[in-house]
Image (spheres, coloured by chain):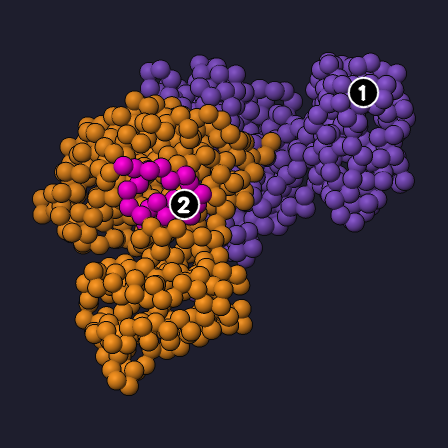
Chain colours: A orange, B purple
Amino acid sequence: MVNQEFVKKLVTKNENKIVLLVMDGVGGLPNEFGNTEMEVAYTPNLDNIVKEGISGIADPVSMGITPGSGPGHLGIFGYDPVKWQIGRGVLAALGIGFPIQKKDVAARGNFATLDEKGNITDRRAGRIPTETCKKLTEKIQNEITEIDGVKIFIKPVMDYRFVLILRGEGLSDKIADTDPQITGVKPLPAKPLDDSAKKTADILNKFIEKAHKIIENEHPANGLLLRGFSEYPDIPPMEEVYGLNPAAIATYPMYKGLAKLVGMEILNVPGMEITDELKVLKENYEKYDFFYFHVKKTDSYGEDGNFNAKVHLIEEVDKIIVPEILKLNPTVFAITGDHSTPAKMKQHSFHGVPFVLLSPYARPDRAEYFSEREIGTKGGLGRFEAKNEIILMLAHALKLKKFGA
Amino acid sequence: MVNQEFVKKLVTKNENKIVLLVMDGVGGLPNEFGNTEMEVAYTPNLDNIVKEGISGIADPVSMGITPGSGPGHLGIFGYDPVKWQIGRGVLAALGIGFPIQKKDVAARGNFATLDEKGNITDRRAGRIPTETCKKLTEKIQNEITEIDGVKIFIKPVMDYRFVLILRGEGLSDKIADTDPQITGVKPLPAKPLDDSAKKTADILNKFIEKAHKIIENEHPANGLLLRGFSEYPDIPPMEEVYGLNPAAIATYPMYKGLAKLVGMEILNVPGMEITDELKVLKENYEKYDFFYFHVKKTDSYGEDGNFNAKVHLIEEVDKIIVPEILKLNPTVFAITGDHSTPAKMKQHSFHGVPFVLLSPYARPDRAEYFSEREIGTKGGLGRFEAKNEIILMLAHALKLKKFGA
């Protein structure tokens, strides 16, 4: 497996277009009749692409590893997900669509319940509703916007969870969690893990003290716990590494954030439907040479354990989205997921993910329909790590020069 | 994937023989009827080997990377083509059969046209014919054979292109190109990229000055441009790493040069036909335990876009070469290419390359005939990087001991 520095030297630009359709969590497991979501779905268009193109099973990170959405997407964008680890604080900020910037430090937060001695009695403050969380973060934000020249942002996520973002010079994410993960003890102070983080820890401790004052009479949410401190990573953009002019079409903040992280232009989608996304693809087709088109709900239905809804959505994508992308006639049309989410498991899983590539330069194989086992046993790409996908897409779009003479 | 140092410790010698038949550029893409060159070719003998042996699809460098002949061959000889990069100057010297040695520094050269101020008006000197190039290099060589104790060789390649080789102590290839890649400016002086290259740069600048004097009244070729400075790499020979006593049977200088690079004995082939090569194999069969047998024209016909000629040559190899190699009864008979050259693309491509191995110790798979998609979907070796091939060949010849107890 070659690395980005190697590929970068081979990149050559041309007008050929690449469309990457990511059905989030698309791979699955069989139902009681022995067929997976992909196999039950009636997908004549996708079947035809499998037949005409080349396919294989990709491991998002490596065999047996279940990826979160961050590593899953970084892999398919061509970034080694083990090398480029996106911290949980940053992912949480991306997830709520916060416009996080390079050098920002972010942390995930819980509202908690403290007793009169300041010891934690409930790490989740009785799971207060999102509305209360919103009210509390606004109350704190109204009184604290800056400490020692560093800007402070506190934003609600869901239930008792919030995100804290620090913005300013000389910050570091080398800070230990203040969440002790147990009750009956006080929240830990923000402790610097090395000297570079002393200033950040100092600001955090001032913040915690002030915030605790502001909510001391609230109940049950009168305390804060912080964890997963992380810095917005300095990832080289896709333009620099792969010579692409990439655009992202997604409806959920997390995926827009991940796409922005690798330097994609985020196109505004005026709605939450796949048809809204399709409209944006068509309108912008001339302006970019790489499109990341994200379908969220295959994963959501998988996580809900709703086998039939996942089947139906795959059918909708096949019927509504796929033919229209084919009409645009990109040089490369690739279809995959960022991980599998079998309805049977109601969560992301470690199973390989089908990857299908259609191009005039694809060498046909024996796979004939859109099924994990068909692609896994008759696909010409075999089994491989997902970070190869971008190289395969560039190659089939003739965007890579020969290596050596 | 294990490295050479690892394998080296496991090597054990025996009398078993390995024949590696490399059909240059053998993989392809389908014609208008949906079949590749390999699939159209009638190859009963190769089909039988696929049926009896084990096969798979190899990526010469890594998925999606199109290799030149250098990296393509290094991979199948068991040398990581990313680690061992052969410079363009050295490859050019190998390509004309110049007996380049370790520590030599080589560069590719162009004859160019300079105006009265010394500025470049044509980087290719009006594409002078090879005959003129030969005359000019001889004129220079007659007057310059040594500078400051360093031997100078200047040899014609084709049209306006030549090779320059320096031989002596303390040379370095850390020299910037003198070819500015544009017209309207003077050729650049040879500039050392680090202190180790000062002496080499000094000699090169003396050479350029003298050579320019010698050809100053020539037209249109009155200037020299040099690029791709490279040192003959210090690659450990196959004997040392793999315990083999290897011989090369090839007709074109480039492939003889690449084989020599890894320490093979180059057997003299008295002709350019595959039957000439076969005769040499038979005559020398007792003397070596590893034979690299190179068939060039599968690649040449691919580059010409001549689908039918490529098909025909594959059939010739099947009919004439394969049965005779089978009669010799080597313990391992492996058949592959150094890369694919689909007639459809008229160039080396990024597609995987079929690899077939016949041995009494090969575990049979389900592949039944000599076809990329058959081997790619039913071959027992799956998809793998070509640098594993030598290990597979050694293993099936029982030339590797057990690792660990």
Which quarter of the image is occupied by the C terminus of chain B? bottom left
**Mark 2 sits on what residue?**
A260
Q: For the residue labelled by badge 1, is the local secondary structure a helix, a strand or a loop?
A: strand
Q: Residue at x 76, y 18 (%)?
A: B121
Q: Identity of the amino acid at label 2? A: Lys
- In-image side of A315 versus B336 (left or right): left
Q: In this rendering, is residue A95 above or below A311?
A: below
Pick the front one: A220 or A183: A220
Q: In this rendering, is residue A203 above or below B22?
A: below
Q: How far from the left and from the top, in percent, is residue B360? A: 39, 42
Q: Identity of the amino acid at label 1? A: Leu
Pick the front one: B68 or A74: A74
Q: Which residues are magenta?
A: A249-270
Q: Residue at x 42, y 74 (%)?
A: A205
Q: For the residue labelled by badge 2, is the local secondary structure a helix, a strand or a loop?
A: helix
**Mark 1 sits on what residue?**
B114
Q: Are marks 2 and 1 on the same chain?
A: no
Judging from the image, mark 2 belongs to the subunit labelled A
Q: In this rendering, is residue B34 above or below A255?
A: above
Q: Residue furthest bottom?
A: A117
Q: How far from the left and from the top, in percent, is residue B144? A: 88, 29
Q: How far from the left and from the top, in percent, is residue B71? A: 56, 37
Query: Residue A328 occupies which quadrant of the picture?
Result: top left
- In-image side of B349 versus A93 (left or right): right
Q: How far from the left and from the top, in percent, is residue B219? A: 82, 13
Judging from the image, mark 1 belongs to the subunit labelled B
Q: Residue at x 24, y 38 (%)?
A: A271
Query: Marks 2 and 1, how far apart in space?
Result: 50 Å
- In-image side of B267 versus A184 (left or right): right
